[in-house]
Structures are given as C-alpha cells and as structure tokens.
Image: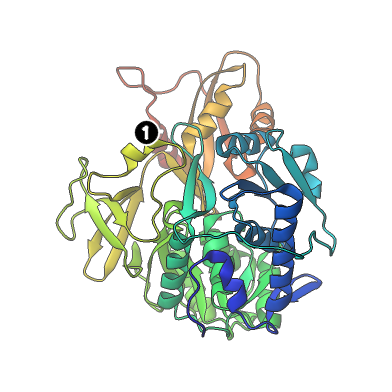
Amino acid sequence: MLPGPELLHEIIGHGDKNSTCIIDGGYSFTYGQLGEKITNLASYLVHEYSIQKRERVILYLPNNWKFVVAFYAVLRAGGIVVPVDFRSSKRELDYISDNTQASIQFVDEIKRDSASNSCKETIIVSRGPDFYGSSDGFKPPEIKPEDTAVIFFTGGTTGFSKGVPLSHRNVMHMLSGLSGMLGLKYGKETFVQFLPMTHSGGMNCSMNTSLYNAGKTIIMSKFDPTVLLDIIEQQKVSVVIGVPTVYSSLVKSTDLRNRDLSSVRIFFLSGDKIHENVANEFRAMTGKTIVVGWGLTEASPQLSVAPPGKFKENYVGKPLPGTEIVTVDGEGNILPASSIGMLAVKGPQVMSGYWRNEEKNLEVFTSGGYLLTGDTGYVGEDGIYLLGRAKDVIISGGYKIWRTEVENTIMEHECVRETAVIGINDPIYGETVKAFIVSKCEITKTDIVAFCRARLSAYKVPRIIEFRSELPKSSIGKILHRVLEQENASRE
C-alpha cells in the first residue's frame, strides 16, 4: 500500500489503475479510467466555468458513477462540494444554494425543473455514457488538508438546516480510523453502495471508504433487499454498510436462510441504534453479527465502532483513534467515568463549526472545545453506551428529522392553527413522523400531505396525521410534546 494521501481526491490515484473501481449497471470503470474522467471534468470546470478555489458547487444527483466523478472533480479543481439529497424539494435546494452562495450546480436531467435560480451556472447531467471535459493544459490549484472539502446540510431545531463544513483532514482521518477498526484489506474489498451518496454516511462510510481502500464499489440506484442479496451473491460482496431499516427489511422481506452470504466479512450499521430483536434474528438467519457504530454528520460522521462480533444492547463501540468522548452535565462540565449525561466529543474528524452560524456554534461547543452531540449515554470500561437523544429529533430509516422543521412547514398552511410533530415507533423505519393538527378551516389529511410533499423531502412528510380540537399545553402556553408521546405510547 502506498503512503496515505492527505487530500480526499488523491485517493483515486492510489488504486491500481487496472483494477475495477466502479460498477454501475452496464458501466464499469477501472481506477485509471475513473481518474481520467475526474481530471477531464476538473479541467472543464476550470477552463469553461472559471471555477475558483473554495467556490461552492452543488451536486443534485442520484446514486450513480457520475456523482462519483463530479464529486472528485470539484475537489480536484479546488471547489467545495455541497451535496443535496436527491429527494429534496426545490425550496430546500434554493435555501442551501442561497446559504452557501453556490455558483455552480450539477443537476440530473430529470430534475432540471427543480434547479435553483440562485446559481449562476447549471450543468445538466444526462443518464448517458458521456461526461464533459478534456484535461489539456490543466493545472490543479494548491489545496491544503485544512481546506474545506464538503458542506453537508443537517436539519436544525430552528426549522432551518445547518451547514456542516468538513475539511479534507476531517474526512481523511475518519476514513483511516474506520478502515482500521473494521479491519479492511487494501485492494481486496468489494462494497455495495445503496445509501445515498449525498449523505455523510453514504458518502464517507461507504463510497469514500471503499475507494480509500482501493476497493470495488457496486452502485445501486436505490435500496431493494432482494436486489441487494442478488448482488452480494453475484459480485461476492465483502462489506455492507447499512442503517437499521436495511437490516429490518432483510429480515422481514427476504429469505436470508437460503442466500449465500459467505463472502460478506462485515455487515456494518450506523445512523441509529438497531433493535436487539432484529440484530438477534439477523444473526440467527445468517450466522453474521452486525457490527455497530455511532456518529453524526458533524464528525464526518463516525465516532465509534464496536469490535467485530460484539453486540450488546445500547453498546456502540470504542472511539476511533484520536477521538475523545466524555459525558457532560447541563453546564458543560465533564462528569466522572460511567456517569450518564450528554455525550460530548473531540477529534480530528469533528468539524470546527457550522457554516456561517456563530450563534449556533456557541451553543454546541463547550468552553473546553467539546462538541455536544445531543445524545445521552455513558462511557464504560469497554466503550460507549448510547441511551437516548435530544427529544426534538426523529430518526426514520437512519435519517434525522428535526420536528420543528416539519412543524414550521405545516404552519405555513392557511388552514392550520396549531401543530405538534412527534416520532412514533415503526417496525420498518424505527420511527416515523406523526403530526397533530388544530385546524381553523376545512382541510383534509390528503391536503396536508400534498402541501408538505411540495416543501419537504419525502422522508420528512408526516405519515400519520391526527386532527384535534386543542393540543396539551403548559401553564405558559407551551405545547407539551411529551404528553402527546405518552398518549400515543399508551395506545400502542
């Protein structure tokens, strides 16, 4: 193995030029071929669009090989990648574009009508075999490890998404740490990519981890349990990176016992805790123990990984190398070992602060420089135990949904007087969104769903809606979400 690269886009050049890098349907590329396409596109951005260093470039693309090329080309040209969930509404895309002052956007051809009006330039990406560019005369700019590589957007309790800038160094440290703790073999692994590349887990834990280890990546446009199992058998996949929904679907929707999973060394889980019953059933059906971990977008995203073969309730493993995890009280003071409190973290993979949001940075970092994760738990002798999370976050299928964002959207409807959103148990997604609404004129559940779908990503839209004449409130008029949660739990 060559000495480790310092910059994210340099990892492509470390793979064997003749080894297969990407398989996407009928397309297959070696590391040499992919590297050439990346260089050509980077040159195209410099010569045709005069891209400047640190210029923000939106990628509004689905899972496919062109996303990979565009991602690394933007970095090679000195830009900063701003990935946008392909299911996002035009309003969400416009907000991200405005917030980052992005100048260029790559937009898939089927989403051309949703392109942001804020970007100066729009590059429509077709589904065909060609891409743009020629590398003639291309001179890449000087880029340093501390330069920002990517800005992810994560939901906010104020109803607005927050930009999470991660440097090349942040991501490269996470890739190194995760690879070591999973025991990945350089040049020997085959990954299957179904998590969205626009999210930190799908991009960094899956796509970039595979390429960092000179692996082969089989791209799926979307998750399908039967197709996944077919690919595992046909391509001899060795590493699967999933979220709880994936494993629940495999257990419930497919006959795992009759499938050949012998090639898979690692079934990894991050994004949220998995129910113990699902993990046990998966192990009983496959003979494989799910390797669990814990992280958040602000940490590139991985913070901890459990030793392979070890699964315990609430246990999420040991910190990545160089990562410090403690618990703190409400004042940010570090608590004694094994004390339950809010988990707070430091590490080379942790962001330095939110994008242009100093007010929020003052809230999420302690005076000692620890990032408050919003999760409660404790640090035991064998690692980290995760007990809960901030009550205003709903995790559905591994995706974080801030209830205030959904509430604020619903309140924009002229017929809504009040609303409250909670997360309720769901056998497939872990949690799903339920909205309670007090109306002031005639409105139906269908109206609310349609209204939300036009303004929110599909996974944020309430699946269950209950109309009420009033909502429970405190003496000062604050809506009591916990009462609604208790009422809902008593019916289950």
Q: How many marks?
A: 1
Residue farthest left in this picture: 336
Left/right placement of residue 276 relative to residue 97 reads left
> Does the image show residue 263?
yes
Q: Quadrant of residue 100?
A: top right
Q: Which residue is painted at 62% across and 13% down in the image?
A: 441
Q: Which residue is mark 1?
A: 359
Q: How is the image coloured?
A: rainbow
Closest to the observer, 405 or 42: 42
Residue 450 image offset from top left, x and y in percent = 69, 31
Residue 423 image offset from top left, x and y in percent = 47, 41
Q: Which residue is painted at 47% across and 32% down in the image?
A: 404
Mark 1 lies on a secondary structure that is helix
Q: Quadrant of residue 457?
A: top right
| Residue 117, above or below 389 | above
Left/right placement of residue 111 relative to residue 420 reads right
Closest to the observer, 299 or 243: 299
| Residue 465, above or below 168 | above
Residue 152 image offset from top left, x and y in percent = 53, 49
Q: How would you rate the neighbour count of disc 1 (Cα within 10 Å): few for under 14, some for 14-19, many for 20 or more? A: few
Q: Which residue is painted at 32% across and 38% down in the image?
A: 363
Closest to the observer, 224 or 54: 54
Q: Amino acid at mark 1?
A: Glu
Q: Which residue is painted at 64% across and 70% down in the image?
A: 254
Residue farthest top in this picture: 440
Residue 98 image offset from top left, x and y in percent = 60, 34
> Does the image show residue 462?
no
| Residue 457, above or below 315 | above
